[in-house]
Amino acid sequence: QVQLQESGPGLVKPSQTLSLTCTVSGGSISSGNYYWTWIRQPAGKGLEWIGRIHSSGSTSYNPSLKSRVTISGDTSKNQFSLKLSSVTATDTAVYYCARDWGRAVATWGQGTLVTVSS
Amino acid sequence: QSVLTQPPSVSAAPGQKVTISCSGSSSNIGNNYVSWYQQLPGTAPKLLIYDNSKRPSGIPDRFSGSKSGTSATLDITGLQTGDEADYYCGIWDSSLSAGVFGGGTKLTVL
């Protein structure tokens, strides 16, 4: 059974780059027809899809965030990562990593709160 | 403003049925598979429905989904207090080439 765990700084200063890592256990990020996905949720608000990386390495991003987002995978560590540059307070949210089989996000991490503040 | 439109809130009494709608367009619901998620307070979302109407293992048949044209619905029958949660529809949008979620619907079981 696949499990995902987010990790990274809980506090990031404005204008800096937010970096998070998702460690996957129980399955390989480089096998199967899966998409390894990042989703975020500001406090009291809805879900926002950030982007995903396929097991083949191809990526897709939310057009509204595309200029600031990079998602990459490290098959040697079975991890995938999110980098969001030039952050502002509006990027404060709980960030989830998840596994998407192309038609649904079936497995979610527990989420990690990232606050953007000086 | 979400690409998918959901009512902000719905409510019903225990034992009753509630329907949550999700309205989209031809670039998303009209041509792709809808999924539904339940988010209990303070927890990560959980997949309830995939491929418009299929339930993952362990999801009670009180939860059902359907799709018609550019709209989808989630029905919950035999409401329980434990069903109080936020519900989201989600889908791939072919025009945006991105995933999208509805704004979410808060279910209150009176």
Image (tube, rainbow, N blue to C red):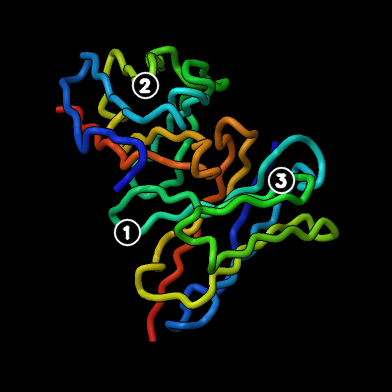
Residue B107 occupies quadrant = top left
Q: Nearer the viewer, residue A88 or A12?
A: A88
Residue B22 occupies quadrant = top left
Q: In the structure shown, which secondary structural element does the residue marked by tag 3 occupy?
A: strand
Residue B2 occupies quadrant = top left
Write the residue at 62% across / 34% down.
A102
Q: Amino acid at mark 3?
A: His
Q: In the structure shown, which secondary structural element does the residue marked by tag 2 occupy?
A: strand
| Label pair 1/3, CB-CB below 8 angstroms | no
**How busy is the neighbourhood of tag 1: few (under 14 within 10 Å), some, or many (20 plus)?**
few
**Number of marks in picture:** 3
Q: Mark 2 or mark 1: which is in front?
A: 2
For disc 2, the marked residue is: B72
Residue A43 circle label: 1
For disc 3, the marked residue is: A54
Q: In the structure shown, which secondary structural element does the residue marked by tag 1 occupy?
A: loop
Q: Report if residue B64 is visible in the image.
A: no
Write the residue at 20% across / 28% down.
B109
Q: Quadrant of the C terminus of chain A?
A: bottom left
